Amino acid sequence: MTVAASLVLGGCSEGTPPSAYQHARDRFFATVPLTMFDDDFYPCFRTVDGQPARLSAADCYRLTAPRRMRGVARTGFETGSFYPGRTTLPQADERSDLWIELDPRVLAPDVRRSCAEGCAVYLDFIGRRTAVRGRYGHMGLASHIVIVDRVLSARVLD
């Protein structure tokens, strides 16, 4: 019984660690598995107008200070990979452990139109990264999220 309690309270999962979250309630729900009761018991979920809603990554996770970043972003359905330092398309089988959150409204109109269904784009931007390694992005396959705050330049690659 003592071992089970310490595993539950200590956070025995391999998910995103409690220290990754900004808010105490989310750190608590990342540690204590109460999700079987209600959606509000998931980290970063809230009930808004009677409906479950998820906080944005910027409102949910602890982030680093904004800084300039450059690289290639690949976006699309269930896709959001970022390849820092790249200027050309990554190989089809090349993986990134960075998930990118790119709001289309920060892109110039011509780039936004080209990327409406997803694309590969070279970005020079000001952004932030999650401060704690965890499981982020689609199916938790990325170790960090990169959030684009302001685009300095963007060039569509495909």
Image (cartoon, grey):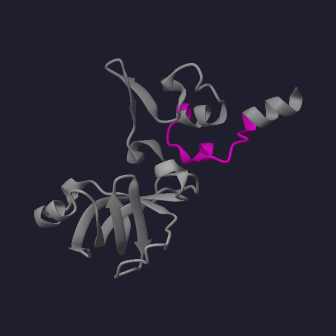
Give me the residue at 60% from left, 23% from top. Answer: 36
Considering the image in quadrants, where does the N terminus appear?
A: top right
- Magenta residues, start to end: 9-25
User: Furthest-left residue in view?
Assistant: 109
Location of residue 137 with respect to 36 vertically, above or below: below
34 displayed left or right of 26: right
Q: Where residue 136 appears, x then y in whole percent?
A: 51, 51
Location of residue 59 with respect to 106 vertically, above or below: above
Give me the residue at 52% from left, 35% from top. Answer: 43
Considering the image in quadrants, where does the C terminus appear?
A: bottom left
144 displayed left or right of 100: right
Give me the residue at 52% from left, 20% from top. Answer: 38
Instruction: Choose between 99 and 65: the one closer to the eye.
Output: 99
- Residue 11, magenta (yes or no): yes
Location of residue 36 with respect to 85 vertically, above or below: above
- Residue 15, magenta (yes or no): yes
Q: Quadrant of residue 32?
A: top right
Q: Where residue 21 appears, x then y in whole percent?
A: 53, 43
Q: Quadrant of residue 3?
A: top right
Q: Where residue 73 appears, x then y in whole percent?
A: 35, 68
Give me the residue at 59% from left, 47% from top. Answer: 16
Q: Where residue 100 appears, x then y in whole percent?
A: 39, 59
Q: Quadrant of residue 76?
A: bottom left
